[in-house]
Image (tube, rainbow, N blue to C red):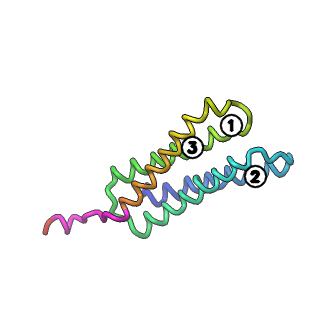
């Protein structure tokens, strides 16, 4: 599957998860997970959707290996971040335990953003370019 479609599918999954958590908080009148809800929607849905658009419009010829590392780095970082936040704000684990996990996940998401910037700034060479 192309990266634009992979990112679109994961973005929509994050949107469903974020909306579901928001509806659950509204139904229970318990808004303790609002930080988790926000991260699901922003880091998961919005950033993944933006990456889908970037791949579709500008990175059709991006190197597969670099794109794959960037995709998985973002997805794993975002998922670990969301799970750790859910555990933190749900009172399932203390901050002291989750702080290194959240830091690592945040750095993974940041590195994925840096990789995306590099892919946008350094265009991939086509096979026609390499034959010149």
Vertical arrangement, residue 35 with respect to residue 121, above or below: above
Q: Which residue is mark 1?
A: 88
Whichever of callouts 3 and 2 sits on the residue coming sooner in the sequence is: 2
Chain part drawn in magenta: 120-130
Q: Where is residue 112 drawn, in percent x and y?
A: 44, 51
Assign a secondary structure to mark 3: helix
Q: Which residue is mark 3?
A: 79
Quarter of image, res 94: top right
| Nearer to the camera, 24 or 80 | 80
Q: Is residue 106 left or right of residue 126?
A: right
Assign a secondary structure to mark 2: helix
Q: Residue at x 55, y 53 (%)?
A: 10
**Mark 3, other Cα within 10 Å: few <14 / some 14–19 / many ≥20:** some
Vertical arrangement, residue 79 with respect to residue 58, above or below: above
Q: What is the CA distance from the residue labelled 3 to the residue labelled 1?
A: 14 Å
Residue 22, label in figure = 2
Q: Nearer the viewer, mark 3 or mark 1?
A: 1
Q: Where is residue 65 drawn, in percent x and y?
A: 33, 50
Q: What is the CA distance from the residue labelled 2 to the residue labelled 1?
A: 17 Å
| Nearer to the camera, 95 or 54 | 95
Vertical arrangement, residue 9 with respect to residue 86, above or below: below
**Mark 1, other Cα within 10 Å: few <14 / some 14–19 / many ≥20:** many
Residue 37, label in figure = none
Q: Where is residue 51 drawn, in percent x and y?
A: 48, 60
Q: Quadrant location of the N terminus?
A: bottom left
Q: Quadrant location of the C terminus?
A: bottom left
**Mark 2, other Cα within 10 Å: few <14 / some 14–19 / many ≥20:** some
Asked if the residues shown at circle 3 and circle 2 are in contact, with their CB atoms under 8 angstroms apart, the answer is: no
Assign a secondary structure to mark 1: helix
Whichever of callouts 3 and 1 sits on the residue coming sooner in the sequence is: 3
């Amino acid at each position: 599957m192309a990266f634009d479609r992979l990112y679109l599918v994961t973005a929509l999954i994050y949107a469903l998860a974020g909306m579901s958590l928001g509806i659950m908080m509204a139904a229970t009148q318990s808004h303790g997970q609002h930080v988790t809800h926000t991260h699901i929607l922003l880091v998961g849905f919005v950033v993944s959707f933006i990456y889908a658009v970037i791949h579709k419009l500008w990175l059709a010829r991006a190197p597969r290996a670099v794109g794959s590392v960037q995709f998985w780095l973002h997805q794993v970082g975002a998922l670990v971040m969301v799970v750790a936040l859910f555990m933190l704000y749900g009172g399932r684990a203390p901050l002291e335990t989750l702080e290194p996990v959240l830091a690592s996940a945040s750095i993974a998401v940041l590195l994925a953003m840096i990789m995306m910037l590099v892919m946008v700034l350094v265009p991939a060479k086509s096979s026609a370019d390499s034959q010149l």
